[in-house]
Amino acid sequence: MFYRFAKSAVHFILAIIGGRFQVQNKEKIIEGPYVVVSTHTSWIEIIYLGFALYPTPIHYMAKQELFKGKMLSWLMTHLNAFPVNRSNPGPSAIKAPIRLLRQGKVVGIFPSGTRKQTNLHLKRGAVTIAYKGNVPLLPAVYDGPKNFKEIIKRKPVIIRFGDAIQVHDTEQEQKLVLEQKSDELMKTFEALQAEIEATKNK
């Protein structure tokens, strides 16, 4: 309930002060459970991806530093986020999202780094979770403001979805599957960004 309230309130504010918001390839959004993966460089992408997938709630994997203090921990938990130690990930980094997937929920993973300087380790983590949870990956690319200053300048926002990536469409051993699907995910991000640029040039 708090997730829906927060979404509505923030969406209302951004609709007033922000630029045009466009979701491309919305028909590619699949039925849950699945892992939605998008590279990002700021917190803004996470908010707009939540808008794009609404009314389906996303359960976000977030760094544990965001859960310090009772108030902040309460807020993050009620926004469907769960903590992960990214510098030293333990069993919870896999167990928590897999438990959510088995409950039929959607898990969101946002590897750090720009599109040109991607973090293969974190993307492989997303593929591993999808593989062990026996669900597909839904790739998405965000193009828009990176900070509040760019929001109030009304910079347009685009989120473009790609085709779902099935991680269990092969009988190869797990290590090879994870390598191949991680590479496919990175190439998909690059292709989606190129497609966004093409639509902006029309």
Image (spheres, rainbow, N blue to C red):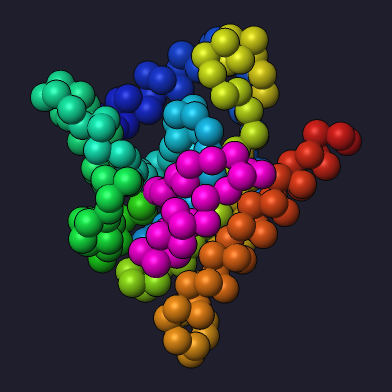
- Residue at 72%, 54% in the rendered image: 191
Looking at the image, which is closer to me, 18 or 141? 141
Query: Is residue 109 magenta-colored?
Result: yes
Q: Is residue 59 left or right of residue 54?
A: left
**Depicted 190 relative to depicted 159: above or below:** below
Pinpoint residue 188: horizontal percent, then vertical percent.
65, 58
Residue reaching furthest to the left: 70
> Which quadrant of the figure contains the N terminus?
top left
Q: Is residue 40 left or right of residue 162?
A: left
Pinpoint residue 125: horizontal percent, then vertical percent.
40, 60
Residue reaching furthest to the bottom: 171
Query: Is residue 163 magenta-colored?
Result: no
**Depicted 7 relative to depicted 186: above or below:** above
Looking at the image, which is closer to me, 27 or 111? 111
Pinpoint residue 58: horizontal percent, then vertical percent.
36, 45
Residue reaching furthest to the right: 202
Quarter of the rendering containing residue 155 = top right
- Residue at 32%, 46% in the rendered image: 87
Q: Is residue 27 visible?
A: no
Q: How many callouts does the rendering have?
A: 0
Q: Which residues are magenta?
A: 108-130
